[in-house]
Amino acid sequence: MKKNPLKTALVGGETIKTDERINFFGAVDELSSFVMELTHHIESEETKKTLKNIVATLSKIMGKVAGAAVDFGESQVVEMLGLIEKEKAQTIPEKGFVTPGVTKLGAKTHVVRAVARRAELSYAQVFAKYAGDELIFSYLNKLSTYLYYLALKFDQQNQ
């Protein structure tokens, strides 16, 4: 029996590969890969651990969107807000347009930030069609803000 190449499995059934959720999973998979690649260029073990935790949270988000019962909620968003404040406190406020990626590490981090924005936009389609979770939206939005301040810190430390 031939399997339909346009179908893929979700929790509780199958869906077509052009479904918005499948597109979102691809965007988050790409984001997770870029985040993990970034860990290989960072010296701080604390930052590496933070980024690996972010990848674990992204996996939970994909599970939730797929229909699995996972532990994702407001606490992850609050944690992300704390990470933003920590990185923001370590940067000098920029006036005007920020050139993304003055240094190699800053540039790599800005690429990851841009991929995070794309994942957030991909989730917007899921949210619109399936009445998604506002906390997922908040987390993805705040993740790109965290990555912005992380990149800014790298650029300012290494100029």
Image (spheres, rainbow, N blue to C red):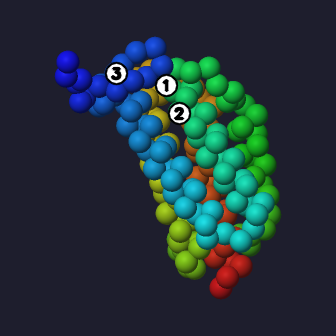
Q: Is residue 153 visible?
A: yes
User: Badge 2 local density, few (<14 within 10 Å), some, or many (20+)?
Assistant: many
Q: Which mark is residue 15?
A: 3
**At which x and y percent is residue 32?**
54, 49
Q: Residue furthest top?
A: 12
Looking at the picture, how far across and down is residue 82, in whole percent?
Answer: 78, 49
Q: Secondary structure at mark 3?
A: strand
Residue bearing mark 2? 62
Quickly name the residue at label 1: 66
Q: Is residue 69 above or below residue 77?
A: above
- 110, above or below 61, in the image: below
How far is the residue under mark 2 from the one under mark 1? 6 Å
Q: Earlier in the sequence, mark 1 or mark 3?
A: 3
Question: What's under tag 3, amino acid-wise?
Answer: Thr
Q: Are marks 2 and 1 in contact (CB under 8 Å)?
A: yes
Q: CA distance from mark 2 to mark 3?
A: 15 Å
Q: Residue flagged by tag 2: what amino acid is it? A: Met
**Which residue occupies 76% across, 43% down?**
79
Q: Which mark is residue 35?
A: none
Compared with 87, 92 (above or below) is below
Q: Name the residue located 34 percent from the left edge and 21 percent from the top edge.
A: 15
Relative height, residue 73 to residue 78 (above, below) = above
Does the CB distance between marks 1 and 3 fall below 8 Å?
no
Do residues under tags 2 and 3 come within 8 Å of each other at their CB atoms?
no
Disc 1 marks a residue whose amino acid type is Ala
Percent x, y of residue 150? 67, 64
Quadrant where the C terminus lies? bottom right
